[in-house]
């Protein structure tokens, strides 16, 4: 049977009918063009498309999936390579975070008696307050009567009344008056009708649930104050990475609001439950905020700085091609030859994978353009994982 040549661009396989040993090269499966790998011919010659000399493809190369890609074609499809190295691995993780209040520092302002708001000094959410600032003044018949009892008890200097003075003073303390306010009542000699109530902590008003002139009941929350000297950053980490994050691990936080500035912190707490919709776990980071640059509800980029331990054999993650259950890379054998190689991967680092099997230090793998190479290669002859059947020889 004579020679048979495929037209350029066909997707059919060429089947050699020539007897083995023709041209004295029984191990050659066919000849092809480095620029147009779809061209396959029984014997040597010129490419019908570009006129380049055809190169031989051995049966061993065809079986292993090796293809030849010359330098010009490499440039056109953007092939880049990298050496397989054994070095310490950057296991850092990145996650999206959000700045929030330090829940441990939130302070509520509530009353322990009924009364009426006479003058509201802090009347908007977001306002800054300092500890000891007057939030409002309150008229309360109960409080007014308690002050009178205290003053009457003080007027008698007998030992029998000492306990009454102490009891009356204690009642005022329990209703929220400071020692300085009680002393001022004693110095005045008469009750204060509209008693000032003070901020118990410094921070910002997160909630305000009262207006001037309102009647208020004991136990109602009038204000919630949030100190911002320390804030939390809550980050969401994917389920498969949660086991790698432990309390105490150092983190680095950056914000779009302050490009170039980094905040150093550590993992404070790993929440015990997952977010069902996203399959992520929440991580809490505590950060000092002396300049108040970190504002609640800001987005943050969180980088968990994890230790890589002993040196590991690793490759760039861009070198890996996923083919169903297998993971493949293209190994550069030199002289334009590229061979697909199955690898077994370990843990994922920051832009790299650990290689457990399939490669050795010093091997060179393709990191860019590998998907185009895979599309042109006859890798189906070695594995079905790209779909289709094995190439016929």
Image (cartoon, rainbow, N blue to C red):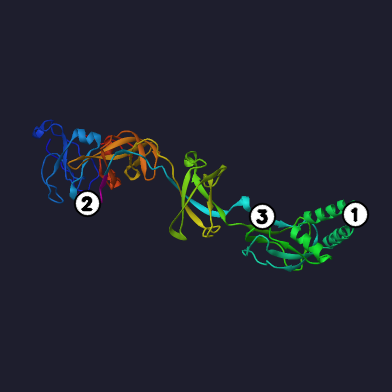
Which sits in the foreground, 276 or 82?
82
* Distance (Cα) linking label 2 and label 1: 104 Å
Question: Is residue 99 rendered to the left or right of residue 386?
Answer: right
Judged left or right of residue 85, residue 31 is left
- Would you place residue 372 above or below residue 1 in this image? below
The disc at residue 358 is none
Q: Between tags 1 and 3, which lies in front?
A: 1
Question: How far across and down, in percent of the image, does residue 90 sit?
Answer: 38, 43
| Image coordinates for residue 167, horizontal then vertical, percent | 84, 52
- Report the Cα–Cα distance between label 1 and label 3: 41 Å
* Residues under numbered marks 1 and 3 in contact, where contact means CB atoms less than 8 Å apart: no
User: Mark 3 highlights which residue?
Assistant: 107
The residue identified by callout 2 is 75
How far across and down, in percent of the image, does residue 148 sit? 86, 61
Local packing at callout 3 (Cα closer than 10 Å; few below 14, some 14-19, many 20+) is some
Can you tell which of label 2 and label 1 is closer to the viewer?
1
Identified at 64% across, 54% down, the residue is 106
What residue range appears in magenta? 73-81
Badge 2 marks a residue whose secondary structure is helix
Name the residue nearer the viewer: 127 or 186.
Answer: 186
Q: Name the residue under label 1.
A: 158
Determine whether 253 is above or below 242 in the image: below
């Amino acid at each position: 049977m004579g020679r048979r040549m495929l037209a350029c661009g066909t997707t059919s396989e060429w089947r050699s009918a020539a007897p083995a040993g023709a041209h004295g090269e029984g191990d050659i499966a066919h000849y092809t063009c480095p620029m147009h790998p779809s061209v396959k011919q029984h014997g040597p010659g010129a490419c019908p498309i570009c006129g380049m000399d055809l190169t031989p493809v051995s049966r061993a190369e065809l079986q292993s999936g090796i293809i030849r890609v010359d330098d010009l074609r490499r440039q056109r499809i953007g092939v880049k390579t990298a050496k397989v190295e054994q070095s310490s691995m950057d296991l850092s993780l990145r996650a999206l975070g959000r700045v929030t209040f330090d829940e441990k520092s939130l302070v509520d302002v509530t009353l322990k008696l009924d009364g009426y708001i006479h003058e509201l000094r802090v009347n908007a959410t977001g306002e800054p307050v300092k500890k000891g600032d007057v939030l409002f003044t309150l008229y309360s018949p109960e409080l007014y009567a308690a002050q009178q009892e205290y003053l009457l008890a003080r007027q008698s200097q007998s030992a029998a009344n000492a306990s009454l003075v102490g009891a009356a003073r204690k009642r005022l303390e329990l209703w929220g008056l400071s020692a300085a306010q009680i002393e001022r009542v004693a110095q005045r000699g008469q009750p204060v009708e509209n008693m000032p109530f003070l901020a118990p902590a410094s921070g910002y008003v997160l909630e305000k649930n009262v207006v001037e002139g309102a009647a208020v009941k004991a136990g109602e929350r009038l204000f919630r104050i949030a100190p911002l000297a320390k804030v939390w950053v809550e980050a969401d980490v994917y389920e498969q990475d949660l086991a790698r994050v432990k309390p105490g691990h150092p983190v680095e936080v950056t914000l779009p609001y302050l490009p170039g500035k980094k905040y150093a912190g550590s993992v404070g707490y790993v929440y015990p439950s997952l977010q069902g919709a996203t399959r992520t776990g929440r991580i809490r980071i505590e950060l000092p905020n002396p300049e108040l640059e970190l504002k609640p509800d800001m987005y943050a980029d969180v980088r968990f700085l994890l230790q890589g331990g002993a040196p590991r054999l690793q490759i760039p993650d861009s070198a890996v091609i996923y083919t169903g259950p297998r993971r493949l890379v293209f190994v550069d054998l030199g002289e334009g030859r590229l061979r697909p190689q199955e690898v077994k991967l370990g843990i994922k680092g920051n832009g790299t994978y650990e290689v457990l099997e399939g490669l050795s230090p010093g091997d060179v793998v393709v990191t860019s353009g590998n998907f185009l190479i895979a599309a042109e290669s006859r890798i189906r002859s070695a594995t079905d994982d790209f779909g289709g059947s094995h190439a016929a020889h």
